[in-house]
Every structure is written in structure tokens, then in C-alpha cells.
Image (cartoon, coloured by chain):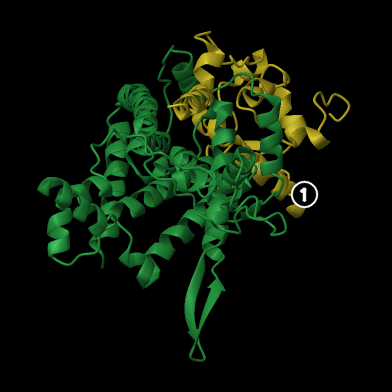
Chain colours: A green, B yellow
Amino acid sequence: MNTRYLFAFLVVFVLFLVSWLGAAAGLGWLFGVVIPYAAVVVFVVGFARKVLSWAASPVPFAIPTTAGQGRSFPWIPQAKIDNPASNWGVFLRLLFEVLTFRSLFRNTRMRLKEEKLTYQLEIFLWVGALAFHYAFLTVLLRHTRFFLEPTPWCIQVLETLDSFFRVEILYPGVQFGLPAVYLSGFVLLAAVVYLALRRIVIPSVRYVSLASDYFPLLLIFGIAFSGILMRYVTKVDIRAVKELTLGLVTFRPTVPEGIGAVFYIHLFLVCTLLAYFPYSKLMHLGGVFLSPTRNLRGDTRAYRHVNPWNYPVPVHTYEEYEEEFRDKMVEAGLPVEKPLADAADEAAQEKE
Amino acid sequence: MKDKRWIVSGLVVFLLIVLFPFWYNRGRAVPPPEVKLTEKAKAEKECVLARDYMKAEHMQILDLWRETVVREGNRIYTNPKGREFVMSLSNTCLDCHSNKAEFCDKCHNYASVRPYCWDCHIENPKEAR
């Protein structure tokens, strides 16, 4: 047993209990209006403050990662995306980093194979991360149907694509698949389970994992699970839910009667995620754009990067140093730049 | 620093996207749809099952009905109160709720749900009766 994931699990469980008891105690206003507004404010203000604090931080060194051949002689082909020398190249590098996680794709694992050290492409983390992020994006975009009336056509197209596979199961006692199954929700759940298990099962990954790594995974698991539960198993009155969510974004908050407790649990976990976001590792959402290893040009040999916090330093040059200590240096037998000739002249002048 | 301008504009764009529902709606009121019941439905007082169940889970019973009729050829449904219904969307459901546009579509459009009932079933099944 590991206290780190146990702690994260306990926190998520307590959050679940709090919202469940809150919903059962009829605290609809607190969990349906006050906490969501507070969470959005914390998210927006916290996110802005974090990014602005990063913007105010100077970049003392040019540290772009050189993941390919840099610009050199014209007859040496340059890796224009992996070691960009122009702003356009940096833009492409960041674009592919954000959309396809290139640096994660380069992940390799060292193995001893027949007493030889080999590097193997470790692709599953990359696949899991891609599935997780794109599924989460789809789920987020789909949820705009609760905040916009009428639902925009592009969201409707997305819903249609997402529910492309009709999975309907009906046996005595088992009924599943209505309303239409959204693939993204299940991909999200599967990916988050994989990413969490990966941290728990692989010993080397478990060793470097902290509670702040497990907590978001377990929280997102809770969110996806409660969402799926609410859509396919213990259904809630969707009309009342949209009345509540639309009330929030139109600043006319209402708490309709008869929304199931699952909804308040789901909403509370989402609010926790929002409020936790700016103060956690999840800020890689903003941080990926501000990584000096990714957003600087790989032209450190062509242009000098001046440390912005450099200030005029009183410099004691070597010439001045030697002027000051020449006689002592000669006496100690140390080599000097302007040696004996000058020293002899000076000595002669002094004698005259 | 000249980078600060880019960072701040990126931040503003991000926050505008995040807060899109707030400024898009700009405080306009969006009243929830009022479902209209026909006189016949009002007179019945209760649907096949309890009101709250029908509100959230009507698709489940429609699915069950379809399965029972199409696969088993059984057309009679007995609800927990012992009342018998002919399992038919067109002839039973739409008998009371003959106002699809004012009843079904109101909530479905509001929640952006596009059920495939109407791929096969016609809205006003007068000839089918």
C-alpha cells in the first residue's frame, strides 16, 4: 500500500461523500449555484494570475531542446521542426507539441536484451495521453449544449459523430445504451483508468508519483464515472439540469426540483477540478506554451541571448589585475602578459 | 518584455473561450420549455408509469416495448398498477400525446437530443389506427 494514492483516493471519496450528503440534505443552492460560481471565479482568477506570474519571470538562458540537427551549413539538412531556427519553426514545433505530444512520442525505455542495452519505443503512454486529452476535449465541447440555447449546429454535428456507434443492450435485468452512447465518455474513462493503473502498477513510475499526480486522475475518474452513471444508469431529468446550468450562465440562477443526487456529485467534482486546476500540475495547459525548452528558437550559436536580469557589474579585467599584482606575480614566478620589459622600464624610470 | 504582449493576448483569448457561454448569453433570459399536455393527456392524470420516471427514463420503456413487440410478438403491457396497455408508440403514446411538436420536440430540442423514433414512425398516425 502506498500512502500517496491512498491519500488521493481518500480525498476524492470525501469529496463524493460531501456532495452526496449535501444533495441529500437539500443544499441545492450551495452545490448548484454558490460553489459553481466560486469555482469558476477561482479558476479564471487563478489561471490568469499564474500565467501573468510566469509572464513576469525572466528567461535567463536560451535553453531550447535540440531534438534534431540545428541550422548549419546549407548542405547539412536541418530538422526544421525539432530544432527550429525561425519563429515560424517555433510555431510549428509548439503546434505539434500541443496537438500531437511529439516529445511524449519520443519516450523510450531502456532494456537489457541478451546482455545488450536497447532502447525501445514506449508508445502506450503516448497513445493513452492522446486518447485521454482528445476524449476530454470532446466531452467538454459536448457539454456546451447545457450552456447554450439553442445548441449550435457544430455541437450537434459533434454529438452525432460521437454517438456514431449504437451500443444497445437489452436483456432481462440489463438495459443499456439509451440515450445514445457517446464514445468519448467511455474512451475518457478507459484512458484515465489506464493512466492511473500505470502509475500504480509500474514500480518505477509509482516511485516518482506523488499524491498530486494521483489526485487529478482519480478526480477525473470520478467525474467521468458519475457522468456515465447519470446518462445511462440512474438518469436525471435533463430538462431540469439544463434549466439550472443555463440559469448559471445567464446570471439568473435557479435550482429546479427533482434533480438526482448524482448530478450534484458530478457538478461538485467538476467544481473541485476547476478550483484545483490553477494550483496544480494541470496548469500544463497554459505552461506548455511558456516552456523555454519549446518556445525559444534554436539559434543560440547565431545570436547571443542576454539575460534580462543582467545589470552593469563593476568588472576588474585581467589587465587591471596584472597591473595591480605584477611584481608579486613575477616574484612568485607566475607568467605575466607584459612581463619583464615593462617591469624593467618602470624600475629604470624609478631609479632615474 | 516584448513576449509579455503575446502571453497576455493568449491569456485573453483563452479566457474568452472559457467564458464563452457567459458573454454569448449576456444575461438574456432563456426560459425552460413548457411542455403542453393535450386535454386527453390531462384527463388521464398519469402516464404508463409514474411522472418522474417517465420524465427521465421514458426511452428505457420505449426500448423495452420495441423489444417485446418486435422480438416476442407480445403487444400487451401491464404496469405495476395492473392496468393494461397496447405497446405502441404510434397508437398508445401518440394517442394522448398527439402534439409531438409541443410535447416531445420541446424538451428534445432544448436538450439537443435527436431520438431516432421518427426515422420510422410518422408523427400523426391517423391511418395506422
Q: Residues within 10 Å of mark 1 (few under 14, many from 20)?
A: few
A21 vs B10, nearest the viewer:
B10
Residue A297 x, y percent position in the rendering:
54, 44
Seen in the picture, residue A213 relative to A296 is either above or below; the reply is: below
Q: Residue at x 57, y 43 (%)?
A: A94
Q: Is residue A242 above or below residue A183?
A: above
Q: Quadrant of the N terminus of chain A?
A: bottom left
Q: Left or right? Give the position of A71 relative to A33.
A: right
Residue A240 placed where, x, y %?
49, 24
- Callout 1: residue from which chain? B
Furthest-top residue in view? B28
User: Which image quadrant is residue B104 in?
Assistant: top right
Residue B99 picture location, percent across and down: 72, 18
Determine the image quadrant of residue A279.
top left
Residue A198 is situated, as x and y percent measured from the top left of the image, at 43, 64
Say which amino acid is labelled 1. Val
Q: Residue furthest right?
A: B127
Kindly state the secondary structure of the residue where label 1 is placed.
helix
Q: Residue at x 52, y 54 (%)?
A: A129
Q: Which residue is mark 1?
A: B70
For residue A59, side relative to residue B7 (left or right): left
Q: Is residue B44 above or below residue A346?
A: above
Q: Nearer the viewer, residue A251 or A239?
A: A251
Of residues A151 and A94, the one drawn nearer to the viewer in this rendering: A94
